[in-house]
């Protein structure tokens, strides 16, 4: 009998995943990672609805309850030091360099599917690792392909796009072929949670600026031609494409189009100034394929945005995506994920943005 280790958070999706795998005949054991370090220099979030949180007692009680109902064991792994170094420190560094990171993507690749699994292997033998993510894995030729979930509204392939071939080779996503409504029905039938249970865990339950731990620093807000229009308390409080909160009276709506950390300046422009024709991406993780052979792909530049039509060219140091109709608010530090149909071709970090005319 094959053994599966299931990452459990106490929520509906991971609970149902563990149950389904047990029903399919696997030997199942739950595992939960702790990512809060007692002497961490980072502040606790204001909201308890956060992955990064010192008090996980409620989640652990729920996990224990679900595991008893299913009839499986559960173990806890401390990944707090690695999480702080690879996720929180990286988050702070990127923001202070005028970039906007994807902490959940790095957490999945380095911590959840990486450090937690490696640590667990020291104590227990298992064949597969599974989570409640909405995505699919299939073998295509000699590679493992990461595919969108059946429920496109819940699809999480964007957040999983940096998983390696090794990680995908032993990963199971039991919910990839189900709709969220079907998962909720199973959860209610099994009595894991109360009907209508709300689920939404953010990376950090509060203002991201709290994690940066920097004092306010007065700087200028300038128009794209250099004209000073106002002031701010720190460039790190702004993101590319931001419109609200600028507090500037102008004849047309203004948007953040660039951040200049070295000058502590926020550069603003008009709506058309947020549109770019191309972006260069580095640090590429090739997933389902090793090259771009199709004339047009779909490129997601944010997790919640639809894919944008683009041609993609592979370079020695990364790739360039040229958007057919331009792309709005391309943000250095964010991930660009290239799709061919449902398959994730590659994932990379946006670096340099081109202009569109």
Image: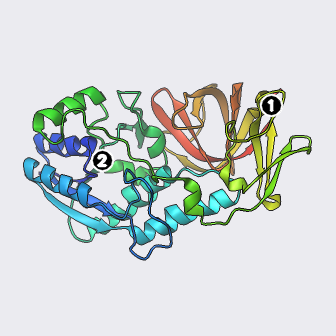
199 or 345, nearer to the observer = 199
**Residue picked out by circle 1:** 270
Disc 1 to disc 2, C-alpha distance: 43 Å
Residue 40: x and y, percent?
A: 46, 73
Task: List x then y, in percent, for residue 154.
Answer: 39, 32
| First of labels 1, 2 by sequence position | 2
Viewer-side residue, 289 vs 123 = 123
Q: Position of residue 130 (x, y in %)?
A: 28, 48
Left or right side of 170 for 300: right
Q: Residue 280's quadrant in the figure? A: top right
Above or below: residue 296 compared with residue 109: above
SS at badge 1:
loop
Q: Left or right of 8: which side holds 230?
A: right
Q: Which quadrant of the figure contains the C terminus?
A: top right
Q: Secondary structure at mark 2?
A: loop
Residue 178 visible within the image: no
Side of 1 where 172 appears, left or right: right
Give the residue number, with chain letter if any, for mark 2: 131
């Amino acid at each position: 009998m094959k053994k599966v280790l299931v990452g459990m958070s106490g929520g509906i999706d991971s609970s149902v995943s563990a149950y389904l795998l047990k029903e399919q005949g696997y030997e199942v054991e739950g595992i939960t990672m702790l990512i809060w370090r007692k002497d961490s220099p980072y502040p606790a979030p204001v909201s308890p609805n956060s992955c990064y949180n010192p008090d996980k007692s409620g989640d652990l009680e729920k996990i224990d309850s679900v595991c008893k109902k299913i009839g499986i064991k559960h173990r806890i792994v401390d990944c707090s030091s690695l999480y702080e170094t690879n996720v929180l420190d990286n988050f702070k560094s990127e923001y202070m360099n005028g970039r906007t990171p994807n902490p959940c993507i790095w957490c999945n690749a380095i911590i959840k599917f990486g450090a937690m699994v490696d640590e667990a292997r020291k104590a227990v033998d298992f064949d597969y690792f599974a989570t409640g993510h909405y995505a699919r894995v299939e073998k295509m030729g000699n590679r493992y392909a990461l595919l969108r979930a059946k429920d496109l509204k819940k699809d999480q392939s964007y957040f999983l796009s940096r998983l390696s071939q090794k990680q995908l080779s032993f990963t199971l996503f039991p919910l990839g072929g189900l709709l969220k409504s079907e998962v909720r029905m199973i959860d209610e039938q099994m009595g894991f949670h109360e009907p209508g249970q709300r689920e939404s865990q953010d990376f950090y339950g509060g203002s991201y600026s709290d994690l940066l731990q920097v004092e306010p620093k007065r700087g200028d807000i300038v128009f794209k031609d250099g004209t000073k229009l106002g002031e701010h308390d720190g460039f790190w409080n702004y993101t590319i494409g931001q419109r609200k909160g600028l507090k500037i009276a102008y004849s047309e709506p203004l948007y953040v189009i660039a951040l200049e950390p070295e000058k502590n300046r926020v550069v603003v422009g008009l709506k058309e100034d947020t549109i770019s024709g191309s972006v260069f991406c580095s640090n590429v993780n090739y997933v389902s394929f090793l090259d771009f052979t199709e004339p047009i792909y779909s490129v997601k530049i944010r997790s919640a945005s639809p894919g944008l039509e683009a041609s993609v060219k592979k370079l020695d140091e990364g790739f360039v995506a040229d958007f057919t109709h331009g792309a709005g608010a391309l943000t250095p530090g964010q991930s660009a994920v290239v799709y061919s149909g449902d398959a994730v071709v590659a994932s990379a970090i946006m670096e340099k943005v081109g202009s569109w005319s």
